[in-house]
Amino acid sequence: MASAAKRLEAVSGTAAPQIAFESVTLQLGGKTIIENLSLGVRAGEFLCIVGASGCGKTTALRLAAGLYQPTSGKVNFDSQPMREPRREIAIVFQDYGKALLPWRTAAGNVSLALEAGGMPSAERPARIEELLRTVGLPGHAGKYPSEMSGGMQQRLQIARCLAQEPKTLLMDEPFGALDAMTRQGLQDEVLSLVAASGATVIFVTHDLDEAIYLGDRVIGLLPHPGRIGIELAVNLPRPRDQLSTREHPEFLRLRRQLFDFIKATEQ
Amino acid sequence: MNRAVILWRVASFAVAACFIALWQLIANLKLVSPVFLPGPDRAWAALVRGFSSGDLWSKLAGTLEHMAYGWLAASIAGIAIGAIIGSSRTMRTYVAPSLEFLRPLPVSAIIPVAIAMLGLTQAMALFVISFGAIWPIMLATIHGFAAVEPRLYEVARSLQMSRLAVIFKIALPSASPDILAGMRLSLTVALILSVVCEILAGLDGLGHWVLLSARAFRSADLFAGVILLGVTGYVTSVAMSLAENKLLAWQAAQR
Ligand SMILES: Nc1ncnc2c1ncn2[C@@H]1O[C@H](COP(=O)(O)OP(=O)(O)OP(=O)(O)O)[C@@H](O)[C@H]1O
Ligand SMILES: [Mg+2]
């Protein structure tokens, strides 16, 4: 209930932003990748970022993670400047195969985050089991990542991120490499996980439908250099449903608007 | 164990048995003078005699000791130095060329230097053995550390892991297949150099035993020593492979 109230507060916009980009410009190798980006993400908000390939989505996410420092401007987290990555901000990488430790079992991979958080070893097994159950991997604790399917590996990465007990979850095309069925299942799981934890989410995707289906707000980036081109509030009822939400007139209207925007940027 | 594996085992034993039979035949027919070539029967008898008198035990222990200390010293130093060089790009670019210069240098070339500095001592043997055995381990470690998936370092950063935790939980396990392969190569190098040092410095060990037997024309004893060296090399490398399989079980899952 508490998280639902928090979400309502977040969406209605009374809280100060948890993550704030203030006129952020980033240059890499002499090239301006992101220019003058200002953006506030409220606590508990689900923000989706879309845009053509190479427009700077991943770069924006890495700035939010503290993996890059802006060339000018500021990225704040809870009103404090972000100097380096922190445990409260978890990242789900698209290439789950590279982000997991192949020499650790599923349990060991989740344990990595608990160890980093300083949890005593006696308490870890119970927590690991709980997390693996949460992401739908009960009974797979002893498997190595290489023995799991792509969908299972991505669930495992999500479990490790949840083990960080993040205030913010950053997801970079997390389901991009998965088939449609697995993808829809994971979309719903992420929504319910996020609803349960009250975490803030920034979700990067290529898939416009996915962005509208998941988000409270969708931002479309323009390329060269990356900046905000469109911002849409998604006023669709929650919990969302794969069938009825996608048939909702508002969904279709937003989808149309977003498609037109992307088409225009591609010309 | 399946059928094919058993068949292969049987076949390899048969081949070994044929070799021994052939050796016995050559010895019996005296194709080579018995002064130089004892038959397997005499070599075996010498082996049994050496062990029951306890002489061979102490020689074997001496060689194993030289080999183990040298190899362990090389492993610790090789992994530590390799980790330092391998985990920094600048170190790699500056240090790698000098390593490429030093690496092909035959170890035999530094033996006179070691003897001049340390004398005919255990310390000299330890230095020479570990100097020779360090290269495969150090180069493998450098390579293993350089090849760690960068994404994993980002995971470590976002988990705010300490430097030490990153080395022990990410870099070392990731490089472990390379490191263990290097350690296996070094095992052979360490055995060879143990024997060389024992021969040169007269240190207690199988090398010394072999040398004395040859000088006294006790060919059966000489062969007993050589056989024991072969067995030592074989057993240590099998033990190393077993340890590798156990430590790298996760790789078997990957294939
Ligand atoms: N380290 C870097 N150095 C120089 N240029 C970079 C670097 N990283 C990214 N870029 C450039 O910045 C631009 C944006 O890259 P980014 O990866 O953020 O795009 P993206 O929107 O995530 O693309 P995609 O949808 O293909 O993942 C690209 O043109 C890319 O070539
Ligand atoms: Mg990207």
Image (spheres, grey):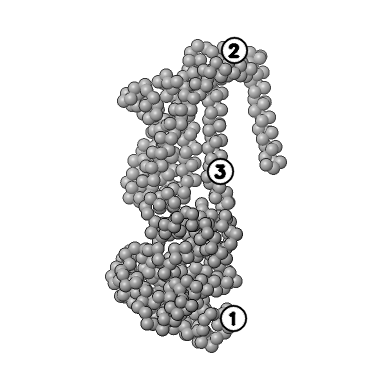
Ligand 1 near label 1 (Cβ, under 8 Å)?
no
- Residue under label 1: A243
Q: Residue at x 40, y 52 (%)?
A: B165
Tell me the CA gap for discs 3 and 1: 50 Å
Marks 2, 3: nearer the viewer: 3
Q: Is residue B9 visible?
A: yes
Q: Residue at x 34, y 27 (%)?
A: B114
Residue A197: x %, y % from top left: 47, 71
Q: Residues at badges 3 and 1 in contact (C-beta under 8 Å)? A: no
Residue B160: x %, y % from top left: 38, 59
SS at badge 1:
loop
- Residue under label 2: B34
Tell me which chain the residue with mark 3 is part of. B
Please indicate whether residue A27 sits to the left or right of residue A142 in the image: left
SS at badge 3:
helix
Please indicate whether residue B69 sits to the left or right of residue A192 in the image: left
- Residue under label 3: B245
Q: Residue at x 59, y 81 (%)?
A: A243
Q: Is residue B83 above or below residue B123?
A: below
**In terms of depth relative to the viewer, which is nearer, B37 or A122?**
A122
Tell me which chain the residue with mark 2 is part of. B
Amino acid found under the numbered disc labelled 2: Pro
Please indicate whether residue A45 sits to the left or right of residue B27 in the image: left
Tell me which chain the residue with mark 1 is part of. A
Amino acid found under the numbered disc labelled 3: Asn
Count residues near mark 3 (Cα–Cα under 10 Å), then give few for <14, some for 14-19, many for 20+.
some
Q: Is residue A216 above or below residue B110?
A: below
N-terminal label among 2 and 3: 2
Tell me the CA gap for discs 2 and 3: 44 Å
SS at badge 2:
loop
Count residues near mark 1 (Cα–Cα under 10 Å), then give few for <14, some for 14-19, many for 20+.
few
Residue A101: x %, y % from top left: 49, 55
